[in-house]
Amino acid sequence: MSGPAGSERSESARRVVVVGGGFGGIQAVRGLRRVPVSVTLVDRQNFHLFQPLAYQVATGSLSPAEIASPLRAVFKRQENVRVLLAEVTGFDLDRREVTLDHLANGRRRTTLGYDTLVVAGGSHYSYFGRDDWRPHAPELKSLEGALEIRSRILRAFEAAELETDEARRRSWLTFVVVGAGPTGVEMAGQIAELARDTLRRDFRSVDTRAARVLLVEALDRVLTSFPESLSRKTEHALRQLGVTTLLGHTVVDIAHDSVAIRGPDGEGERIDAHTVVWAAGVTASELAALLAREAGLEVDRAGRVTVGPDLTLPGHPEVLALGDMVRVQARDGTLATLPAVAPVAMQQGRYAARAIAKRAEGETPGPFRYVDKGNLATIGRSKAVADVKGVHLAGFPAWVVWLFVHLFYLIGFQNRLLVFLRWTISFLTHGRGARLIVELDGKREPPGPARGG
């Protein structure tokens, strides 16, 4: 094996390199535990983030360690796995090598050889070509983003407490969430509950219940991936929490202290707000473009690379790509763009492991088939919606389903227990024990132009 030293694996073992410790990568590695291969998992972070609960970190319900699991702890009993903390910056498909950079020991630009490569790079939110908005509107796809959002939300209430000018106080108490998919809906509902319930007795000069939470969505309803009946119920539940939904509105500008939006009639409006959360649009990991360029392929408008029905890169059967960064081309040439959700990546990760095992035995795997198990979204305390195989649930029953599904998929018994206890205490006391303002990189965010996220 070329590249990083320290491996004592047998060179006779087939080398499988898995890039990405997200949902797809984790499932691929786990699925290879009884396969006679040597697996190397590469990620630029040393933990797996349970991203569906990142918004609860951003609103103080959970602590970071409760939704993140160290990769080495996850695989400490899987002896055919080693974990490398490094960033993948390139691929050489002809030489079957992955280029690594920013290794933990300070080394730069080394290579790692493979016999089979699995790339599960995931995705991040798209600012639709306006990356200059990113410093003013952090996103929720990362732990760093969740912590920054938490600090901005809590600091906004602290600023409002000190502010004597009514207009400036109102701007500090205005929160804008862009995008009304599950993440945006969940985020808006949590901010509203934080203001109207959790914090209402914590301050002396400001009434936190006066906070405005605006949910901006370019389409004509919230949760467009859900049935219309559940969208209507979600919008009603949001209104009960005090969230104002601005449907058919698009964001045209974001500054450090305001957001400009355009309504369905084309009229523009600038809203004074210091806290903006971005939850709109998804674009594939840059790894998709690197793979496509190396293989002579193109990416679509969302940056996804096209793979075959068995998730392999065209012309490179030894390379599998999966998750949010791919679209699947069936044998008849039709393209399937699957939802950018965790269940898709998990099923594809398990399929990739089975495909590698079959090929090791000289068999040919069949095509990947996604089994849609439904959609879930929580709105607030005891409020959720669920679409499970045609069965539509709303309110408390959907919330209970949401709780148990997320506990089931959370990695690690300790994390499940801690989250369950935290949720139980929060439900009984209406409290949020992780309301801490932290300064990322040791810098305090100034009250004027926001720093980069």
Image (cartoon, grey):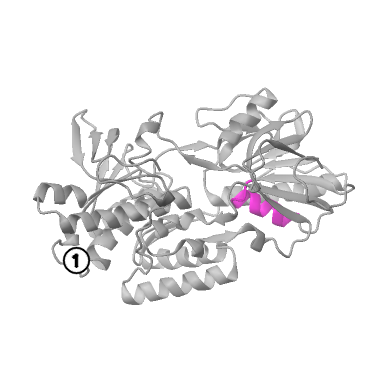
What residue is shown with label 1?
203
Residue at left offset 15%, top offset 51%? 169
Q: Is residue 391 visible?
A: no
Vertical arrangement, residue 61 with respect to residue 246, above or below: below
Left or right of residue 94: residue 393: left
Q: Is residue 311 left or right of residue 228?
A: right
Q: Nearer the viewer, residue 124 or 151?
A: 151
Position in image of residue 239 (x %, y %): 24, 55
Q: Nearer the viewer, residue 368 or 176?
A: 176
Q: Residue at x 60, y 24 (%)?
A: 298
- Examine the rendered structure and indicate whether residue 127 appears above or below residue 192: above
Answer with the quarter of the image where residue 54 lies: bottom left
Q: Is residue 451 magenta?
A: no
Q: Residue at x 29, y 42 (%)?
A: 216
Residue depicted at 77% across the width and 41% down the height:
116
In what quadrant of the picture does the C terminus appear? Answer: top left
Residue 122 in view in this figure: yes
Q: How many marks?
A: 1
**Residue 26 among magenta residues:** yes
Q: Which image quadrant for residue 386?
A: bottom left
The residue positioned farthest toward the right in the image shown: 12
Residue flagged by tag 1: what amino acid is it? Phe
- Which element is circle 1 on? loop
**Whole-percent x and y of residue 425?**
39, 76
Percent x, y of residue 55: 41, 55
Closer-to-camera residue (190/234): 190
User: Could you tell me what secondary structure mostly forms the magenta stretch?
Assistant: helix
- Which quadrant of the structure image shows residue 26? bottom right
Magenta part of the chain:
20-32
